[in-house]
Amino acid sequence: MSKIRMNTELRNKLFNKIKHTFESEDTQEREAYLQAREFVNEKYVMASQLAKQVVERSYPVEDVATLRTFKKKYGQPCDVVAKDKCFYFALSEDLDDEGQQTETKSHFDFGLFGNLNGSEYSSEDGKKFAVAYYREELKAKDLNPDIFAQQNENKDNPHKTKNVDECMKALGYSNHNDDGIGMNKTFNAPYYLDVIGTSYCRSRAIACTKNEYEQFQTWRLAKSNLVVNHQKWIDTIVKQCDQLKIGLKAYRYLSEGIELATELGIQVDEAELIRTNSTGLTIYNPSNLASMIKGMKNKHQSREAKILARKQYEKTVN
């Protein structure tokens, strides 16, 4: 029997199998990514507890309860209590040259898509954090949470836009200033706190100490580090896959691709690859190919054979 020739479908199957192994390998880059995600979880617990202390120091629970009582009694004019998950925390610094006290403040957003640079406006960074954090959940939905990392040096294009939009939809992202649905809403729920004043958070900077401010910065930096480590890990996979594509494209026979996989320590069943091919064994197995070709022929059928076939058909449907 002749060797099985490569085709696009077989190349893709081999590529995806080997790529999956690359993504599952216990490498330093993958471990750094996983550790960064665990660190984010730890810092979220710390920062959210600290935020509760700082916010309730400025907006005591008793005052919030009183204002809610007034709202219930007097209605809209006393509707001044709201829940929020992002805050301007302000640190009073030393006096400047003119004797005025300086202030350092920044926007800290506890939401899944919260900005990572202190701005109150949304950006791609928040989306990068979200897909890095929920990578496994998105992969399980056959989506591509690595799209930002893979397209890091590329401008927006239809392929990137399509994959980003699919991930955002699965995460429950909303273009409006709300929680959307699904994972987004679930993630954000624990981080809401009561604040007094329904205007934008920029207008109600909340005082905190230097130590508290630095802890909030550490938490936000942990989110940025997750994005950075996700990028580094995916960079290594992209480089490997680029070489893999070149090699598979050059191979003429399936056996060469299987030999490559074996050299990489990946076991590939040739029969399984062929059996799951869209055309199946029909193309490569002589007896199956012969049967398929014979079935394509226009054969003369006698009147008696047609009557018998009709009777057999009627028995099956009655």
Image (spheres, rainbow, N blue to C red):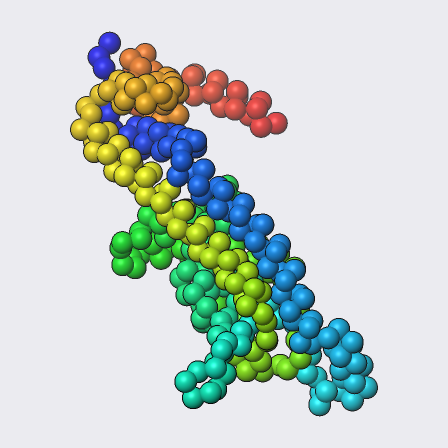
Q: Is residue 119 above or below residue 156?
A: below
Residue sitting at the far top:
1
In the image, taking residue 67 as reference, residue 214 lies left or right, namely left
Q: Is residue 227 above or below residue 95?
A: above
151 vs 4, nearest the viewer: 151
Q: Nearer the viewer, residue 313 or 173?
A: 173
x, y percent for residue 298: 29, 23
Residue sitting at 50 percent across and 71 percent down?
A: 107
> Image point 59% across, 71% down: which residue?
208
Q: Can the viewer see residue 194?
A: no
The N terminus lies in quadrant: top left
Viewer-proximal residue among 240 and 283:
240
- At horizontal 52% and vertical 55% (from top left) the residue drawn is 171
**Residue at the image point whose x is 20% and y is 25% from the top:** 251
Q: Residue 216: x, y in percent?
A: 54, 62
Q: Residue 188, how many percent across, how many down?
A: 60, 60
Task: Determine whether 179 is above or below 244 in the image.
Answer: below
Q: Where is 23 relative to 131, above or below?
A: above
Q: Quadrant of the C terminus?
A: top right
In this picture, residue 190 sits left or right of residue 127 = right
